[in-house]
């Protein structure tokens, strides 16, 4: 179905609604990427490039510093019952819909800044990328970093991830492992002839239940680690003793650990649980807060309030790996991300836009 072209002259809340009405669950971002590219190419002060469904626009004013504003254009799957697309603005000024919080309100702020800030005091790069909500190897920002790292060069980056209007520093690493136990298949009426792989996973679950989360302070921010089973699979039929069981475990860890240290911790933690096969399914590292960097400190001062840690993984990690200090900031409430009743206070969106505009033009 054809969409109305994006109108970057709309206020940020109305533009958010327009973005939400472009359904873009991960893997289906092309229509929205096309619309963003078309809208940005109409702005003469920007140079626009595209790689896949990732769009990068830049000013080239010769400023002493370059700031990158980045946001993903995909969402989690759209709900069906009740549907959470198209968007809906209620009488209390709440904008409802899939992606309102995570993170089309942030993308709307990026687009408004791109349209209105033609003479910033710092050069600007705007990055709109796909596939953030799925496996790390699909992430569009990662693909751009591999193919065109020069497009992402900068002195400081802001990820427009939901933070409820405050700065959130760094991010946690995320490690997903598959812990597999083996057994011997048999008829459930003669269970003693086999060995139950699901029962063999009991020590894994007991160890998870006994886990005490670590809460380290990293550069002044207190993080909270987590180790959880997120899926259990086993069994082939209701009358068969299962010969294999897989417990999928997700470790969210603080940025004072390296990827190697995090993996070593998980291996050691389950070493005495009878795991027959240990498989790393997905792993992306953390990022330290970096709030003492001059650009980060200046931005924190401009936003105001006490910075918080980012409880979760974001692409500040990728910028950190590229040597670009980065923080998270946008109007959405992170507690509402991915929920069927995802929503954002419409008035908070232009407030975030004005905060960024004031900082980028001061």
Image (cartoon, rainbow, N blue to C red):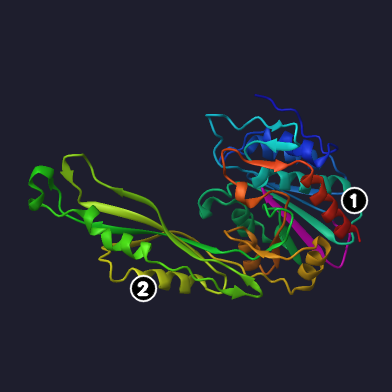
Residue at 66%, 45% in the rendered image:
101
Residue at point 67%, 70% (across, down) = 323
Q: Which residues are magenta?
A: 60-72
Quarter of the view holding residue 248: bottom left
- Kindly indicate the quadrant of the structure image that contains residue 254: bottom right
Q: Residue at x 68, y 50 (%)?
A: 71
SS at mark 2 in the image: helix
Q: Earlier in the sequence, mark 1 or mark 2?
A: 1
Residue 85 falls left or right of residue 185 = right
**Which residue is under mark 1?**
118
Q: Would you say 125 lies left or right of 238 here?
A: right
| Image coordinates for residue 208, horizontal then vertical, percent | 37, 62
Measured in 3D between alpha carbons, the distance from the residue under mark 1 to the one under mark 2, in whole angstroms, is 54 Å
Quarter of the image where the N terminus is located = top right
Q: In the rendered image, is residue 67 in sight?
A: yes
Q: What residue is drawn where x is 75% and y is 65%?
A: 156
**Furthest residue to the front?**
92
Identify the mark at residue 77; answer none if there is no mark.
none
Q: Which residue is mark 2?
A: 268
How many marks the image carries: the answer is 2
Q: Position of residue 314 (x, y in %)?
A: 61, 58
């Amino acid at each position: 179905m054809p969409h109305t072209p994006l109108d970057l002259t709309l206020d940020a809340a109305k533009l958010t609604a327009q973005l939400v009405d472009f359904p873009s669950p991960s893997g289906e971002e092309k229509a929205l990427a096309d619309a963003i590219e078309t809208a940005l190419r109409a702005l003469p002060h920007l140079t626009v490039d595209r790689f896949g469904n990732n769009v990068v626009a830049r000013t080239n004013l010769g400023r002493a510093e370059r700031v990158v504003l980045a946001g993903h254009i995909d969402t989690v799957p759209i709900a069906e019952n009740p549907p959470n697309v198209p968007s809906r603005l209620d009488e209390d000024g709440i904008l409802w819909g899939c992606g309102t919080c995570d993170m089309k309100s942030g993308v709307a702020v990026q687009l408004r800044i791109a349209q209105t800030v033609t003479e910033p005091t710092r050069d600007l790069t705007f990055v709109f990328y796909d596939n953030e909500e799925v496996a790390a190897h699909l992430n569009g920002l990662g693909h751009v970093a591999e193919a065109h790292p020069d497009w992402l060069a900068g002195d400081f980056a802001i990820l427009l991830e939901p933070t409820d209007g405050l700065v959130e520093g760094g991010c946690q690493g995320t490690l997903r492992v598959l812990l597999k136990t083996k057994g011997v298949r048999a008829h459930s009426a003669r269970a003693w002839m086999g060995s139950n792989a699901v029962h063999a996973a009991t020590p894994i679950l007991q160890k998870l239940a006994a886990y005490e989360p670590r809460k380290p302070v990293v550069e002044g921010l207190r993080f909270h680690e987590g180790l959880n089973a997120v899926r259990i699979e086993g069994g082939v039929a209701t009358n068969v003793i299962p010969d294999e069981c897989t417990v999928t475990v997700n470790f969210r860890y603080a940025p004072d650990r390296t990827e190697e240290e995090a993996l070593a911790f998980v291996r050691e933690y389950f070493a005495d649980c009878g795991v027959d096969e240990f498989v790393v399914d997905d792993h992306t590292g953390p990022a330290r807060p970096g709030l003492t960097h001059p650009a980060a400190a200046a931005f924190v001062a401009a936003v105001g309030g006490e910075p918080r840690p980012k409880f979760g993984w974001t692409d500040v990690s990728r910028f950190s790996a590229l040597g670009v200090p980065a923080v998270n900031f946008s109007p959405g409430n992170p507690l509402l991300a991915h929920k069927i009743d995802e929503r954002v206070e419409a008035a908070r969106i232009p407030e975030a836009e004005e905060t960024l505009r004031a900082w980028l033009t001061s």
